[in-house]
Image: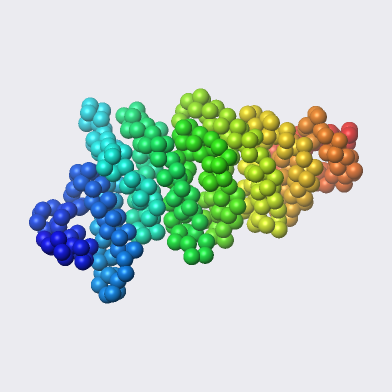
Amino acid sequence: MTSSSSISSTPFEWLSGGLFFGKDKGGSIDSCKDTGLLVKGIQQDLQVMTAANQAEHLNESQHQEEENEITKLMEARLSRLRFLLYDERTSSNNRRNAICGPPVAGNTVESLTGEEYSTLIPDLLSNLCLLDFESRKHVAAIYNYLLVCGLDGSDANLYKPLMTRFRDYVEANFDAIMTPIVQGHDCHQPGGQSTPDVALSCGAMYRSTLRHVPLYSQLVTSTGRVERYVLPFLDTFVGFPNFDVASDAMESLKLVLTGANEVGNDDESHQAMADLASQFLTRDYTKIFDDRFTPKLLSAETANYMTRRMALQILSTVLLTRSNYNVMIKYIASKQNLVNIMLLLRDTSPHITLDAFHVFKIFVANPNKPPEIVRILTDNKVKLCKYLESLHKDREEADPQFRDEKALVISTIEAL
């Protein structure tokens, strides 16, 4: 084993020398079953990686060798921890888990939420850019697993207490965890260190966080939190040129704005999510819809086809959700919103025109239309009715609901 002086001069040597799973121990990472030792090794690896990243290196080739070695060790430990967590739920282990509880998940949560390693998750998330591709995937998989292991599966009840403890840990460290997750989406900022694969991993972790009512509540509890953790999606992320990253960001935005997250089987949790979504959409309506959603996501000048189509689907879901009544009334009372939707009705894409129709019908169905809305519909009555008559004529036979809704919209406009 290396001396203390050589450790300080070359921070990677002690790792290859065998302090954890080295030659003197006669073991290997691949056979380790001690999750506490794996967590300890991961923390040590990360400390060395961050220190080496900040230090000046006179011998670049030696530094590259050492960096490759620590990268391999980190990936091996994360991979082993991930394997142990997922393997624990195989049928061969179910009987043992039912008797004494799942030891791997229990020990892992115990380590990660304990005082000694309480900063490891935030530190890993803040330094995803230093990890290799596989290690990033492992970090996301471990985080996601611990947050959802008690929600799904026939043995979910065994994992729920552990999941709840990890959820409480995330809630207690919400800003330290959510800040790097959101910042990790920004893979196109000049000089930024994020990459598309980091953004996708962060997107998966963001959505796992939203599956818990207390964590979703933390996300939307104040305008300040919404500005930090929601508005960047509207301002930047959904508009990235990378299709996969932009689509992933739109999926996350959809879950935030609709509150339609997979939170479990109980109706109470689903209603709690919907109520929280309604409260924050009402409170921050101007920042979300007037300043961002409509001008940035629904305009052909600022948004591509995919963005406009998904935005229309999100908008339709929000407006037709019963708990969002106040949001709906405010949206359909706006003259500019009606004009924007009427423009989308004339889009060249049949998919967008169909989605736009489902928003347009809400304006028409409103029994208490403001005078300026009535005026626009009346002034354009003839052209509107003629256009609507031919709109998706081919769908009417196969989709009687659409046929009936379109006929009702036309008759309502004609009666104005």
Is 114 on the left or on the right of 147, as rendered? left
Q: Residue at x 68, y 42 (%)?
A: 286
Res. 396 visible in picture: no
The percent position of residue 116, horizontal first and vertical second, equals 26, 42
- Please state which of residues 259 and 312 is positioned toward the viewer in this rendering: 259
Q: Residue at x 86, y 42 (%)?
A: 376
Q: Quadrant of residue 160?
A: top left
Q: Residue at x 43, y 40 (%)?
A: 174
Is 371 on the left or on the right of 179, as rendered? right
- Number of marks present in the image shown: 0
Q: Residue at x 44, y 61 (%)?
A: 193
The percent position of residue 38, horizontal first and vertical second, equals 23, 48
- Please state which of residues 382 and 260 is positioned toward the viewer in this rendering: 260
Is 413 on the left or on the right of 45, as rendered? right
Q: Quadrant of the N terminus?
A: bottom left
Q: Quadrant of residue 224?
A: top right
The percent position of residue 247, horizontal first and vertical second, equals 55, 52
The percent position of residue 159, horizontal first and vertical second, equals 33, 32
